[in-house]
Image (cartoon, rainbow, N blue to C red):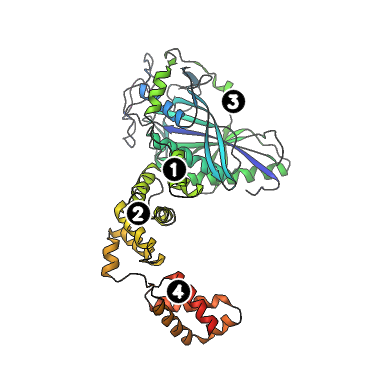
Amino acid sequence: MQYYKGYEMVIGLEVHVELNTETKIFCSCPTTFGAAPNTHVCPVCMGLPGTLPVLNGKVVEYAVKAGLATNCQIAKYSKEDRKNYFYPDLPKAYQISQYDLPLCEHGWLEIETENGAKKIGITRIHIEEDAGKLVHDDEHGTMIDCNRCGVPLIEIVSEPDIRSAEEAEAYMRKLRATILYTGVSDCKMNEGSMRCDVNLSVRKVGETAFGTRTEMKNLNSFRFVVKAIEYEYKRQVEAIEKGETIVQETRRFDPDTGKTYTMRSKEDANDYRYFPDPDLPPIVLTREQIEAFRAEIPELPDARKAKYMQQYALSAYDSEQLTADRAMADWFEQVAGQTAYPKIAANMLISDILRMVDSESFSCPIAPDQMAKLCDLFGEDVINSSTAKKLLQRMFADGIDPEKTVREENLAQINDEAILEQEVRKAAAANPKSVADYKKGKTAAAKAIVGQVMKALGGRANPVKLGEITEKVLKES
């Protein structure tokens, strides 16, 4: 992390996650994404007079599971409150949320940074209902879609423990992975089921007091979170250096310009006039209920990460990468269980396959048993790294069998040292300048000889043996 003009950033994230319930939080309207505007609404989620909300029990269950997965303490007694504000996409002019007695508190997640592992504290997780959506149209102006009104959310509020855009992204990815493992949300950022508000302030390195923070709303991709933080950090530092005062406000990030813009002055808690919702009873949980929810949570990313480091001798960083998506971790484990070279499988997955798959959710067309075959071919020196990469691309695109393809297309690596030395001597004789350059101390000249041999043998030479033999022949020449 490089500080700009001696200032450090202090970041806390508020992450909103839509829960995977079939119906909304206080009514029986469906939560299906993508329905025609204003078709999944009823008098309750529209807040019409005379209606009464009834809490969906699944919302509490899913929120508790998210809290347990993030090492939170679960409240046996909590309540719901009305958060009052006036905005076009909130039909009843208040949102049912939680204020002073949230469902989950005092949690943490561990991330990997350039300086090693770091814990990011989680202040609280509370349940609330989502608001509607404003749709801006050049022809018709601004319209309101209320389908999202009443969709159940959890808001996950971190401590201000984040000190860089990279840490913010790592925390977001770890949080997304953890929630995905529990199954309580699909966390599809492109559909808005996971979105982030960034609270950011700056201060001189070494200071302990917080600066004035701004909030950037509704960032729905990791890249936008990083870009928004980088811009806002620089904007605040430059403003302070000019003698300007940072104003506490809500800002929006424009991905087209990469800049943040003022939306409105930032509200404090007392501006929302919170009070307990009179239509909803308190949420009371027993220890038995909480433990029953805990028992249903599968193995989480940190447990898998520790297992990969111990069982497969993988680094903390690689293990973190592999466990970032439950489907990816499941696929990797199937491959690792069928090959003698799980570390090769991990390297190929991280360096090659992740570039080819959809970044939002992992789905690989290569069958685990076929991937295991490729790892064995490479690990046992049957093929070299160049051939392995080419085969991997063909397996991803066309589903070829690597063993059959290597056999039928004669792609096996040439390990015979006599053949390799013969080809090196031919290449050296044909490239006297490279030999002369090598003798003058230009060791990079050996690469030209290696390239010629690789070309002559169709890229099938064992690169390690070829390099060693080339060095030997050139020194003798």
Quarter assignment of residue 146: top left
Q: Pointer 3: what residue?
A: 268
Of the residues under marks 4 and 1, which one precedes in the sequence?
1
User: Residue at left 56%, top 36%?
Assistant: 120
- The answer to which of 418 and 386 lies nearer the viewer is 418
Q: Residues within 10 Å of mark 2 (few under 14, many from 20)?
A: many
Q: Residues within 10 Å of mark 4 (few under 14, many from 20)?
A: many
Quarter assignment of residue 35: top left
**Is residue 44 located in the magenta-colored stretch of the structure?**
yes
Q: Residues within 10 Å of mark 3 (few under 14, many from 20)?
A: few
Mark 2 to mark 3: distance in Å? 56 Å
Of the residues under marks 2 and 1, which one precedes in the sequence?
1
Q: Amino acid at mark 4?
A: Leu
Q: Pointer 2: what residue?
A: 339
User: Residue at left 70%, top 33%?
Assistant: 209
Can residue 88 be seen here? The reply is no
At mark 4, the secondary structure is helix
Mark 1 to mark 3: distance in Å? 44 Å
Magenta stretch, residue numbers = 41-46
User: Residue at left 34%, top 21%?
Assistant: 27
